[in-house]
């Protein structure tokens, strides 16, 4: 027979939003259970130095997540290494099924499953992730002061990243498979006027090249989609900016969505379209996508859940 665990608040996900929700829900005496999911710690566990989280001039991404986990646990949050495979929100208490077979029932649910950067799927891209290959300019752009870098993509994300990176880089090459961008016109205008940015049309990334000891990027090989000619561009960093995918598999058919699959919340809150279910962090945020804003939303979700449960009582 499957093990069943009940909690007032079930937190699904273990990035900054999830762990912060765990801290606040614990302090509210809600005795929350947090189920970590497939990637405990979330996207920050795949980064190296983090220099934009308040209180830390520099901290390793995985170390920051360990500290957040320890903080939530110290406050009394029960943290479980399981993966939620199904969430039934049709009746209360809500019922979540874990990959372990455990059934979790909850009076309120906080969704903090995050989002995943889209990647190209190249072996060389995977090899240099965190060592010259990134999907977050605001996280890692600072490390490329005075150096040449490339950005891959043609939508809003790519143009915004390229523009932001000109604050640090000596040159930014924007590589796009077509000769026109999908980005908003105002962003395109800014890009074309920026002397540091050089678009490279009709090209795709073939391979990231670099050194093994120490691991680091020295350039990229790109292919002309019209001629098949392959050329090499020297650079110190590669930013893949082809968008993010919210990890919405549990709720994509039951909650209201916006902007291509992000969970819709009511303005100024973390309330979703199902009363008692709250969403925080990158699962709902397609604009900022920062650790500190995710943590802030985790706090909001715990406070919203506390108020909801008080009203139910």
Image (cartoon, grey):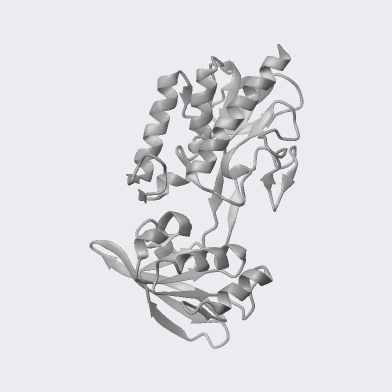
> Which is nearer the eye, 224 or 172?
172
Measuring from the top left, give residue 126's x and y in whole percent: 42, 59
Instruction: Find residue 105 and report its horizontal and vertical position in percent.
Output: 63, 19
**Residue visible at 45% across and 83% down?**
230
Front-most of residues 281 and 88: 281
Q: Position of residue 233 (x, y in %)?
A: 40, 79
Picture coordinates of residue 193, whole percent (x, y): 56, 78
What is the number of callouts on the image? 0
Please give left or right for residue 26 compared with residue 74 in the image.
right
Q: Quadrant of the N terminus?
A: top right
Camera sees residue 98? no
Residue 28, by quadrant, is top right
Q: Is residue 261 left or right of residue 46?
A: right
Q: Name above or below for residue 97 compared with residue 200.
A: above
Work out which residue is located at the far top of the displayed protein and give it: 313
Q: Residue at x 75, y 35 (%)?
A: 273
Q: Is residue 272 above or below residue 169?
A: above
Asked if one can make out residue 151 in the rendered structure from this viewpoint, the answer is: yes
């Amino acid at each position: 027979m499957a093990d069943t665990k009940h909690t007032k608040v079930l937190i699904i996900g273990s990035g900054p939003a999830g762990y912060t929700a765990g801290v606040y829900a614990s302090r509210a005496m809600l005795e929350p259970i947090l189920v970590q999911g497939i990637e405990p710690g979330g996207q920050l566990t795949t980064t190296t130095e983090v220099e934009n989280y308040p209180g830390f001039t520099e901290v390793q991404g995985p170390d920051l997540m360990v500290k957040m986990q320890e903080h939530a646990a110290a406050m009394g949050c029960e943290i479980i290494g399981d993966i939620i495979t199904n969430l039934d929100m049709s009746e209360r208490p809500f019922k979540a099924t874990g990959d372990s077979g455990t059934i979790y029932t909850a009076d309120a649910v906080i969704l903090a499953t995050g989002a995943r950067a889209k990647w190209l799927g190249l072996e060389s891209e995977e090899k240099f992730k965190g060592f010259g290959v990134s999907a977050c300019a605001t996280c890692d752009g600072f490390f490329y002061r005075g150096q040449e870098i490339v950005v891959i993509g043609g939508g809003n994300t790519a143009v915004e990243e390229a523009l932001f990176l000109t604050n640090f880089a000596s040159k930014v090459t924007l590589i796009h498979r077509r000769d026109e961008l999908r980005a908003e016109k105002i962003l395109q205008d800014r890009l074309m006027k920026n002397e540091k940015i050089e678009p490279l049309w009709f090209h795709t990334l073939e391979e990231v090249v670099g050194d093994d000891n120490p691991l680091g990027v020295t350039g990229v090989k790109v292919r002309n989609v019209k001629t098949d000619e392959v050329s090499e561009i020297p650079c110190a960093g590669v930013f893949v900016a082809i968008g993010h995918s919210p990890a919405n598999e549990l709720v994509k058919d039951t909650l209201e969505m916006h902007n291509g699959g992000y969970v819709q919340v009511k303005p100024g809150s973390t309330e979703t379209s199902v009363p008692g279910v709250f969403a925080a962090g990158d699962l709902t945020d397609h604009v900022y996508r920062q650790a500190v804003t995710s943590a802030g939303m985790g706090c909001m979700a715990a406070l919203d859940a506390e108020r909801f449960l008080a009203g139910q009582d």
